[in-house]
Image (cartoon, rainbow, N blue to C red):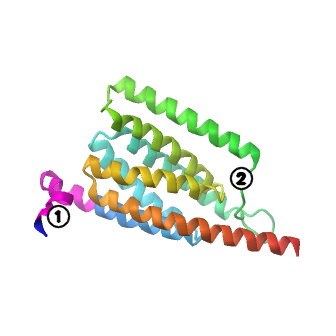
Amino acid sequence: MEPVFDYFFAQYSDYETMDIVLEITGTVFGLLSVYFSMKNNILVFPTGIISTAIYVYILLKWGLLGDMMINGYYFIMSIYGWWVWTRKVDAAHVTPITAVTKKENLYSIFIFLATAICVYTIYEYFDKWQSWVSYMDILTTAIFFVGMWLMAKRKLENWVYWIIGDLITVPLYFYKGLTFSSFQYLIFTILAIYGYKSWRTHLNKNQQAVNA
């Protein structure tokens, strides 16, 4: 049992206790945020704000610029999403779950490419290239930027981006030595699958109600 424990957690022997506590705390609030998102609950945003604020600090300290920018962006988009989700589209209804339009798909492509170029430029400027890991950072950052934007807009397809990004991030974070965060993204993947199914069901019911 000990070799297995060492394999997953040996790297934490060199970490400060406060950083470990912060990572675990950020992980817990991150899981709560995804759970509330899956449930279409507004608490997705306050819990997400706490988690991302913690991760911005941790990732900046460890020099993981791509991941830090993802969480900084999450923090800003959580504030925006909180407003969108509570904004009433008429006297009685708030912003509903909808599918992306053709225009929003074009915006998604633009956000993906713009993010990838921006992160590449930052890595180049600060000389932060770490072989293939940096390229994967660019990819996941671009994917998650689109996913967060779509979630803030309450679009069903946000879950597709989360699932793809989470699947890439699980082994990537483990490789980086962030075991707790790697486990977190594994759970994120499972929750994202259930989230897509839940939102799809909710959207279908709304469409049936409109057509009735």
Name which residue lies at 37% across and 48% down: 56
- Is residue 15 part of the magenta span, yes or no? yes
Which SS does the magenta portion mostly show?
helix
Quadrant assignment for the C terminus: bottom right
**Magenta region, residue range:** 3-22
Find residue 100 and name its label.
Answer: 2
Give residue 11's position: percent from left, percent from top.
17, 53
Label of residue 140 in the image: none
What's the residue at 70%, 40% (across, down)?
106
Asked if residue 17 can be seen in this view, the reply is no
| Residue receiving disc 1 | 4
Magenta highlight on residue 9: yes
Residue 202 place in picture, x, y as percent: 69, 72
Residue drawn 67% across the image and 40% down it: 107
Is 112 above or below relative to 74?
above
Tell me the CA gap for discs 2 and 1. 44 Å
Q: Quadrant of the N terminus?
A: bottom left
Q: Is residue 158 above or below residue 64?
A: below
Q: Amino acid at mark 1?
A: Val
Please tell me which of labels 2 and 1 falls first in the chain: 1
